[in-house]
Image: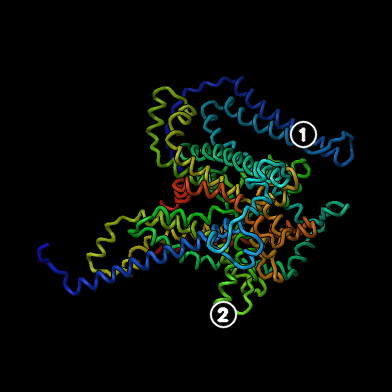
Amino acid sequence: MSDQIFHDSNADRAFKAKRFTGRAVIYGILILWAFIALFPIYWTITTSFKMAPDVMKGNIVPYWDYNPRWLGWRSLGLSPDTIGNESTVRAEFLKRFWNSVVIAVSASVIAVGLGSCAAYGLSRFNYKFGFMRNSDISFFFLSQLILPPVVLALPFLVLYKALAMLDTRIGLILLYTLTVLPIVIWIMRDQFSSIPSELEEAALVDGLSIWGAFLTIILPIALPGMVAAFILSLVLTWNEYFFAALLTSSDAKTLPVMVASQTGSQGISWWSMAALSFAAILPLIVIGIALERFIIKGMAAGAVK
Amino acid sequence: MNTAGDLLHVVTADNISYQRRRFGKLIVWGSAALMFFVAGLQTADQNGWIDLEFETWRPTLYAYIFWGICLCTGQVIARGEHGKRTLFVLPAALFVVSMVVFPLLFGLIIAFSDWNLASPDGRQFNGWNNIQQMWADPFYWNAMRNMVWYSLAIIVEYAFAFVLALLLNAQIKGRKFFRVAFLLPLMLSPVAVSWMIGKSMLENRFGPIARMLREMGVDNPSFFSSPEIARLMIMLMDAWTYIPFMMIMILAGLQAIPKELHEAAEVDGASAWTRFWEVTFPLMLPVSITAILIRIIFKLKLADIIINVTSGGPGGATDSVTSFIFREYRDRSNVGYGTMLAMFYLVVIVIAMTILIKGADRWMRPRY
């Protein structure tokens, strides 16, 4: 190698060092926060494989300072040696899990269906319902977001009792649809207003009806937004606890209610609580990792105008 | 939202005959009459004037749903193309009205009555008694005060979220990993979080955080025995779940700022801090205000973590309004009083949010 001709001056070297410390600080904070965000999840996973002494001693790293056992998962009936056997806990868990799936998915589907239609209508046509015009109708839908669930909870309790809809899945589905509908309309309004209305005009000229143009031309274009709205609704409805705790007792109980009812009764048997908690959050962790793009898209909608 | 003129201009040759229009109106009014008839029958049955042996109010519900369907089809029959356009919004509007307005009106009736679901007397009007009771209830006002504290914590959350968003927006490697890692807390259910963090990690004897504090020389770390620390812990747990939410909104805003602005400022010799404070931050104000307002709305619903970790204790120090009403119902089945508390909370929220939104609007667009 020949001698270097151009050298950094002293001022440039200081700049380099400063730049390096700057990078170090940035990565330091990022890694620290990633640790804060991920440690509770890590803690839950590892705890579900611990035994009582491991919990008492505060062992944290598996294989290093304790031997993982299937203790927590055995109590759920989900460990390798119990998976073939009958297990009432597992049956209970799977029932709650299935309830959560049915309720979350149907509420999200209904909300995305109703919400997309409403958002499309509001972004394309002029309405006049009595004194309400488009902006009033939009505000009416979005203002539902402010309504705290506790205001509706007790009236619904009494109404559902009169309608014999307490402790039914359909009752929860309706309420959950209501809670996520404003968010869906918020996201979809943003989505539709970015689609030029010339598209429908062309479709209408070619002989499609309004609904035909909406279903065959616009919806496919708006699909990413619909997926984002659907996933966000799914997350919110899967995690909902307040209504489920008030309005269900045995048949329609969802997973969060089951987790909550176990926290009190089991005392220090952390391994089974950890296994249960982890099983309850696992679907969402999978969704979060796989579909992160859509979730971010959904939440960013409306933030930037 | 536009209010002037159709965005999508459609000229339709609707030739709706008189009979068709009349038929459309007929089915709407006919089904409405049917609904009122069924509701009237049930009311009469309920009050014991006639004896029809209805088990539940289901028939009225079915009649109502039937009316809803007839209203939607009637629109199309009576108004043709215009009706089809109405059909986009009508189902959603009908759904929200029946799910919100009816229960709210019904809730108003409940709020002014003495109704204990456990007692056999049923509902009795008691006028202003509930309000008087509320006025004198120290625990309720304590919960209200807590909500103010919890809402103020949003400012700190916002600062954290802003820093994290700035870092994620910088030139870094492994951005996707960090984004997913930062997002995950938002995905977890508050109930699971309250066990994972509140009940196990913050446990006094075996929890890793207590252990760490003991290593650092704190004698008897306890997290939920003194009111201030307990409240702080609830705030931290809630912040842990919701900081990603604000972070993502702010990140979206940051990415929308054109790069040229920064380059221009850099060429002009602005330091990194000046670039942030004079360029980025002012440009981010609208997004920040949206993020904070939405966050406040979510914060006002805060309950799950409190119910599951402290159930309001010690001595109501961590109670939010929602968790307080939840226990009021849980422990005493006191529907009337609980509804009154919730209604009052709603009124306070609506007033406060209106002032906040108007204030933010005025501040963003000053009228000289």
- Compare marks 2 and 1 and give the one earlier in the sequence: 1
Q: Position of residue A149 (x, y in %)?
A: 65, 53
Which percent across, then down, holds residue A60? 55, 63
Q: Is residue B104 left or right of residue B241?
A: right
Q: Residue at x 38, y 32 (%)?
A: A199
Apparent side of residue B282 relative to residue A11 in the rendered image (left or right): right
Q: Chain of mark 2?
A: B
| Disc 2 residue type (three-letter) | Gly
Q: Quadrant of residue B220?
A: bottom right
Residue B363, picture quadrant: bottom left
Above/below status of B318 relative to B27: below
Instruction: Point out the image quarter for the C terminus of chain B.
Output: bottom left
Would residue A179 be visible to someone looking at this image?
A: yes
Residue B65, compared with residue B326, is above or below; it is above
Q: Secondary structure at mark 1?
A: helix
- Which chain is disc 1 placed on? B
Disc 2 crowd rating (10 Å Cα; few below 14, some 14-19, many 20+) is few
The amino acid type found where label 1 is placed reads Pro
Q: Which disc number belongs to residue B59? A: 1
- Residue A151 is labelled as none
Disc 2 marks which residue?
Answer: B217
Residue drawn at the location 80% of the way across and 59% of the way down: B332
